[in-house]
Image (tube, rainbow, N blue to C red):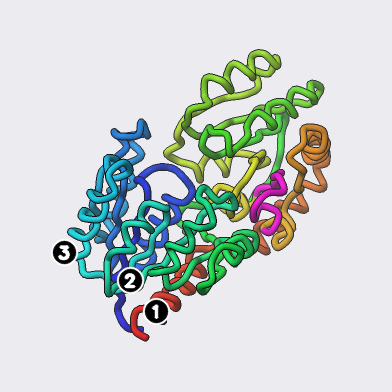
Amino acid sequence: MQKIKIMHVVSSAASGGAEVYVKDLSISMSEKGHDVFVVFLDRASETGRDLEFESLFLDELYQSGIAYDFMGKSCRNNPIKGLLGLARICRQFRPDVIHSHLYYGAIFSLFQLGVPHIYTHHNIKLKASPWFYRLLDLRTIAYIGICGACETLLRQVTHNEVVRIDNGVALTRVLPKHDYQVYSPIKLVCVGSLCAQKNHILLLNALSRIPDFEYVLTVAGEGVKLSELKDLAYTLGIEDKVKFVGSCKNVKKLLNESDVFVMSSAWEGLPIAQIEATLTGLPLLVTDVGGCSEIVDQVGNGLVAKVDVEDYTNKLEKIISDAALRLKFHKNALNNSSQYTISNAVERHIELYARVAFK
């Protein structure tokens, strides 16, 4: 296949699912012989994100021969600066296709004439009015839906092509759990930003309703809700059973050493953390939002609960108490999850890029 010059535009070199996914895509695309450049809007120092994580993120790109640049947070408040900044980078790199992964990148890309633009919306929740997509339609060749639910959502707001490409994870970031033996207390793990979307309040309240079960919950992630969640765990009397470990540098080790992955999100796209847990071989409990249930339905490795404390508590109690069920979910996870690897996602992306860049 012809070599393609691909420019990804993403928010930051941070631990978010979309950001890590773009990194995995970029590295895999580079390994396949394509020329990849990553444009970041923000630096970690500008947004209060983990500086060490950013350094490790950027080093991975560098080691893979992938160039990158930063536009600066000020572009969020000064669109002209953003337009000129992206234009400068485009003149240097001369991409065949621009792939934006956030609204600002999509807006700035609209004015890079002569270069086809693709946009991925990484969530089931729109953060802009439908009219915004009429503007994007002027220059966006195609949209990517990262799950069935996201594909349906995009088709409601755009008249242009929508392609479904499910998220995937690089196998180098997964340590499969082949020996699934569970001892008391059961080790629950939750990975994700500490924000309203991830809805940790539901998870903590559900845990407080099962005081007779032996468990320990490890919460990995950074975010504005940390103090509030610690206070809630104390108020609920479960502070001794919940560990907040911040931004985790070795997620694959954490998942491999855990027994059950739990997620209580209020809205989602197709969570990278859930895919990582699935490829690891963990049983799952997730809420029925976005594409979360699509993974469970396809793989058969968990339970899906409503965004409701009573239903979530019931499902949590079931997955903790039923050892045979957990073992079944573990085996299904290892046997049925290959479609969620990064190689599948990259192949579909490259097909789309080639079609729009060289038509």
Viewer-nearest residue: 326 or 237: 237
Residue where numbered disc 1 is placed: 356
For the record, the magenta segment spans 282-294
**Vertical order, 285 against 8 (above or below):** above
Which label is found at residue 106? Answer: none
Q: Residue at x 51, y 42 (%)?
A: 253
Q: Which residue lies at the image location 75% right of the left edge and 26% below the top edge?
A: 214
Tag 3 residue: 92
Residue 53 on the magenta span: no
Mark 1 vs 2, N-terminal side:
2
Task: Give left or right: position of 321 versus 240.
Answer: right
Across and down, in percent, residue 243 comes to 57, 24
Residue 298, horizontal then vertical, whole percent: 70, 63
Q: CA distance from mark 1 to mark 2?
A: 8 Å
Q: Is residue 104 left or right of residue 224?
A: left
Cα gap from disc 3 to disc 1, whole angstroms: 21 Å
Secondary element at image label 3: helix
88 or 296: nearer the eye? 88
Residue 176 appears in the figure = no
- Quick one: SS at disc 2? strand
Q: Which residue is identified by label 2?
A: 97
Q: Mark 3 Cα within 10 Å, few/some/many (few <14, many 20+)?
A: few
- Does the CB distance between marks 1 and 2 fall below 8 Å? yes
- Where is residue 351? Give x, y as percent: 44, 78
